[in-house]
Amino acid sequence: MAERFVSKKNISFLLYDVFDVESLTRYPYFSDHGRETFDMVIDTALKIATDQMHPVFMEMDRQEPQYNNGTVSVHPAVKKYIRTAGEGGWISATKPYDVGGQQLPNMINFAAAFIFGAANYSLSIFPGLTAGAANLIDNFGSPDLKDAYLRMLYSGKWQGTMALTEPGAGSSLSDITTQAAPTPDGYYLISGQKIFISCGRHDAVENVIHLMLARIKGAPAGVKGISLFVVPTFRPEGGELVFNDVTCAGIDHKLGYKGSPIAQLSMGESGDCRGWLVGEPHRGLAYMFQMMNEERIGVGIGAASIASAAYYASLEYALTRTQGRRVSEKNPAAPPVPIIEHADVKRMLLFQRAVTEGALALLLQVSRYLDCEKVSAGEDKEKYHLLVELLTPVVKTYPSEMGILSVSQGLQILGGYGYCKDFPLEQHYRDMRIHPIHEGTTGIQGMDILGRKVRMNDGKAMALFIDEVNADIAAARGHDPLKGLAAELEQALRSLTDVTSSLFQTAMKAGVEVFLADATLYLELFGLVCVAWQWLKQGTAASAALAKGTKGPDGNFHKGKIASCRFFFAYELPKSMALIQRLMNTDGLTVEVTADLFED
């Protein structure tokens, strides 16, 4: 089990038994594929992850990027991996054939990204960011922009980024000050600063292309005046690359996730930073939200992948580390037992598994909705779009927040060794901590789901979600061991709808500040219900397999799934009751507390 960081068996179970990815091949867009293709992709991803990525996991943490006079040096493995991603078609995997893509389902692409992230999260994000930037240009850019940038981005020779954050503005994008002055030559002159730009400058690629938010001079104040630009570090000009006045002023040194640099950028110091408008003026934030939502889902994948690696590291330790005896053993001379024999260690392992595999299932659920949206039209297309929109804050946040607790439990299993650099848990713990911050903090995600998403289209998104969960509750009732759990989820779903209605009443009576004050807790409640839903789906598939007479290792796998499902309902879902109690309280405590009360 050494060096294991994911379970291929679990990935296959989710893809084929729970979500039936093969059913997508009935649509023309995916019709060239089948299980043989999908298995080949997963096997190739595992080989790349095992042979190329995981061996430098700790090394990249110890040898973090170095800044020197405007240049950033990264680990040599980065260049090799980015080229592998480009040459292997991983960056453009879901795109159409006519742009060099493979028309793979997002479900398969998500599974591969999960494998890569579990092997080495810092390394995995380089091509992921490039794919997001390329998608923006492909969807909203002019033909000239597509011709100039897409091929090089998809090849892995150029890096793509999203450049939003500025000093002082932070997550408040309405306050960005980067300026764009129009010129008669079709480009804009960009001036300003950006910070925390992941992969914003490094020596593993020939060029870094920024998808950058800025204000055209004279634009309206607030978010309505933000436009989107392609701002290359080196601009293509006459068959050559010319420096585009984008200077890297430094990089930040981080708690974890050290293998990839985050850059501080200064544009236009010499007055010659050129940017090309993407789409229409003043619609930049709407365009950028496409990439931002893709990256938010990507953050969820990354968090789940780190949780997976931590789970298998702690499981291996628990299976091999002997210490103590069963509490029922009265003979002090009896040999020590592997610590996995202790009930509390099994509880911690079950918690890790419940979080990791529940989060991955929810991510694959959303990926299936993305695939169905791509191949649908009319009301069906709207349905899947609304479901993705509603669940994006959940799939970003649940793996991120619960992943921290999951990795922490793994560290606890290792005891003192978990706190030392001899084992990977301490690095997983540090790497994991960025995820509740990345691409919109947990608080922002809470306000998004409560303030916007559950009310989308007069509550249609929420109604569709309830229908989806109820359909799986009905399916679970066909299996005797799951009937009680199905009833528990039905009650939790009803409580979620009651809380939602109550909060809307609060908004009308007490105002928006009280309404959104505990939005993070609402998101936590929503996440518990969603992951309970996913565990019930997994329990249903496992129960069906056992009913067919599955035995041996496969039988143990399915029994383990049902045990994990029972654990989530017994240990995690009951936490919803405390959240419900708090959310039903309208005292506005955190709104009423004033800043001076925090003084010593």
Image (spheres, helix red, strand yellow):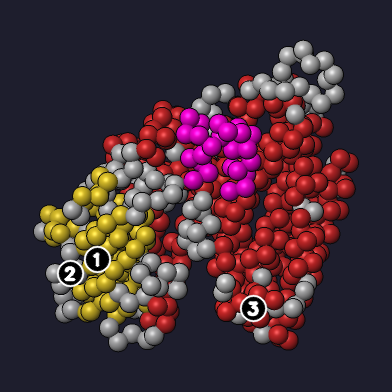
Residue identified by numbered label 1:
266
Pick the front one: 360 or 342: 342
Pick the front one: 586 or 163: 586
Q: Residue furthest front?
A: 600
Quarter of the picture containing the N terminus is top right
Residue identified by numbered label 2:
269
Q: Earlier in the sequence, mark 3 or mark 2?
A: 2
Quarter of the picture containing the C terminus is bottom right
User: From what the image shows, is residue 27 above or below residue 217?
Assistant: above
Q: Position of residue 166 (x, y in %)?
A: 36, 69
* Alpha carbon separation for disc pair 3 and 2: 44 Å
Q: Secondary structure at mark 1?
A: strand
Image quarter of residue 356: top right
Which residue range is magenta in the image? 404-430
Query: What crowding class fits label 1: few (fewer than 14 Cα within 10 Å), some (14-19), or many (20 or more)?
Result: many
Q: Residue at x 50, y 34 (%)?
A: 420
Q: Nearer the viewer, mark 3 or mark 2?
A: 3
Q: Residue at x 80, y 60 (%)?
A: 577
Are the residues flagged by discs 1 and 2 in contact, CB closer than 8 Å?
yes
Q: Secondary structure at mark 3?
A: loop
Q: Position of residue 325 (x, y in %)?
A: 76, 22
